[in-house]
Image: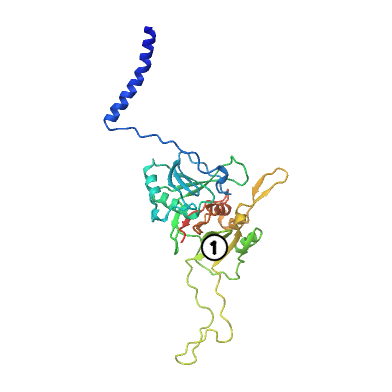
Amino acid sequence: MSTRLGLLASVRAPLFLGASLAVSIAACGEEAPPVVAELPPLVGALEVPISFRNDAPQPSGALRIEGSMNELRLEGQPVYTGLSRGLVPDTEWTPEGLTQLLTRVRAAPARSAVVITFLGTVPYETAVRVVQTLSTAGYHEIVWQVRPPGGNPTARGWLAMSNPLVAPAEGAFTFPGGARPWEQFTAHWAEMYDACRAGQYIDCDGSPNEPAPGGEFQLVLWSRGQGMQMRFNQVNAPEAAPTGPAPVALLEGVPADPNAGGEPPPPPPDTSGVFSFRADEATHVETDRATGTQTPNSAISTTARPVCGAAPCSVILEADGETPIMRVLSFVGAAFPNGSIAPVIAFRLPE
């Protein structure tokens, strides 16, 4: 009997000590914070965007953001719920990003990177605002969870963006560090035209006989609906000098006719090369009939490769606010697939 009482006393002693410690802490006003259970994943493995750029390593211990069409989470806990069509209310928008999300990110322990897992249909507007918020909070390494082509439910991919920028909705945007010469695009224009025509294209600009000289090129990847455009625009070009003899005024006070002599003025030089594709081209694969193996085979990749395959390109991403983020990330992956040099990226805020 005495042995049993001694055993019970030894078991109860730690329990009593723990209860006394809890009472002591409560008495001092130092209550332990409640443990909040993390919610199950918001987005399934097959619901994230497809991307041909997916070989970045999965960051360890990264800050986690998830988004669906009705909820946005940080570290497994809701920040915004009841969203309409995946859009955070515009009352939350500021030049620094999304107010509640920014507060929560700043309160969380600092990490070296952020992993974003978004349902493919989350609108571009929401994605840009999240990137803007993370930039304000000092996060410069963003990794999107994507999936390689194919239907493997266990496949994971990671599309890394180092120091992505946010460009204003309107006006010119200058990347830090300068740009590449315009001639580095025009030298490959004909080759890129042929590559564009080999895919599911909408329209492909042929190279002009005399492209405008000078300046640099700026690449824009634009998405809307089922269409995508890869635009190489000439920027910072010197003002073109007038060509041909100056027109002569025959009567005082009457301006000279620029078309005098019967010859029309020469057409203006081309300052932009535009290659337009159907959205399906960004995820186009070839399937081996014998093995079923799927290999990425996009004309977007072969069109961008001569200029951006081995040398870094700066690219502005543009889309309507409601454009699904899967269109934008798939376009990036097709233009810069695994093995190509990572681009410098700026998300332009939608109008």
105 lies above or below 178: above
**Quarter occupied by residue 331:** bottom right
**Residue picked out by circle 1:** 232
Q: Residue 116 in the image: x percent, y percent? A: 48, 46
Task: Pick the residue in front: 125 or 228.
Answer: 125
| Left or right: 48 as drawn, with respect to 168 | right
Split into 4 quadrants, where in the image is the N terminus?
Answer: top left
Dot 1: what SS?
A: strand
Dot 1 alpha-carbon crowd within 10 angstroms: few under 14, some 14 to 19, many 20 or more: many
Looking at numbered disc 1 in the image, what kind of residue is underneath it? Phe
Q: Residue at x 35, y 19 (%)?
A: 14
Total numbered labels placed on residues in the image: 1
Residue reaching furthest to the top: 1
Q: In the rendered image, which quarter is residue 259 located in?
A: bottom right
- Closer to us: 187 or 222: 222
Asked whether residue 332 appears in the rendered view, the answer is yes
Asked if 243 appears above or below 224 in the picture, the reply is below
Q: Is residue 93 visible?
A: no
Report x, y in % for residue 333: 56, 51
Where is residue 141 drawn, in percent x and y?
45, 47
Q: Quadrant of residue 24?
A: top left
